[in-house]
Amino acid sequence: MHIARAIKAPLSGLACAATLMLGVASFSTPASATVQASASITTTQPTVTRAQAASASVAASRVTAPACIEREVNKKQKIAWITNTCGKTRKVKVVINNGPDTYCRTLKNHERIYHRWPFGSYDRTVNC
């Protein structure tokens, strides 16, 4: 009987993988056994997983909203008025440092919303 296993493990923080091949040759009798082992380390180009690609697209969508999304912020009263003057429907979110953000809001052209927060400070308005 011949058994071969491959173990692939990432080297913490490095863009390469180590492959360890272990093989055991067949036994003719219990007294005479032959064991073969070989190890090889190969480097590979880093690959992007689906989860990494998804998080990258989420990060890209969280960029600051364009200038046609007008912001009026009163930091003392902790209120932000957001107006869409882009000429088309946009989805935006108000981000508050150390406070509650809005959920993703859909704004039609010339629609205006406001957001109040009890604590924290206005950070930015982002696409979502």
Image (spheres, rainbow, N blue to C red):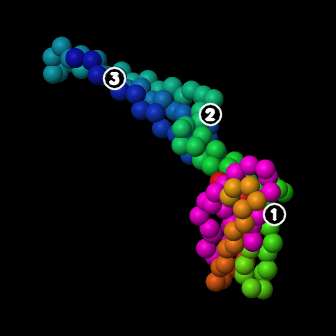
Q: Which residue range is magenta in the image?
A: 81-106
Q: Mark 1 = which residue?
A: 70
Q: How many angstroms separate mark 3 from mark 2 (CA)?
A: 26 Å
Earlier sequence position, callout 3 versus callout 1: 3
Q: How many angstroms separate mark 1 from mark 2 (CA)?
A: 41 Å
- In the rendered view, tell whether residue 16 sits above or below residue 61: above
Earlier sequence position, callout 3 versus callout 2: 3
Q: Which mark is residue 4?
A: 3
Amino acid bearing label 3: Ala
Mark nearest the camera among 3 and 1 is 1
Q: Quadrant of the C terminus?
A: bottom right
Tell me the crowding category of disc 3: few under 14, some 14 to 19, or many 20 or more residues within 10 angstroms, Cα based.
few
Amino acid bearing label 2: Pro
Q: Secondary structure at mark 2?
A: loop
Q: Secondary structure at mark 3?
A: strand
Q: Which mark is residue 62?
A: none
Question: Which residue occupies the foreground of this view, 78 or 4?
Answer: 78
Determine which quarter of the picture holds residue 27.
top left
Question: Which residue occupies the foreground of this view, 99 or 79?
Answer: 79
Question: Which residue occupies the foreground of this view, 37 or 83?
Answer: 83
Determine which quarter of the picture holds residue 64.
bottom right
Mark nearest the camera among 3 and 2 is 2
Q: Mark 2 = which residue?
A: 46
Q: Secondary structure at mark 1?
A: strand
Earlier sequence position, callout 1 versus callout 2: 2
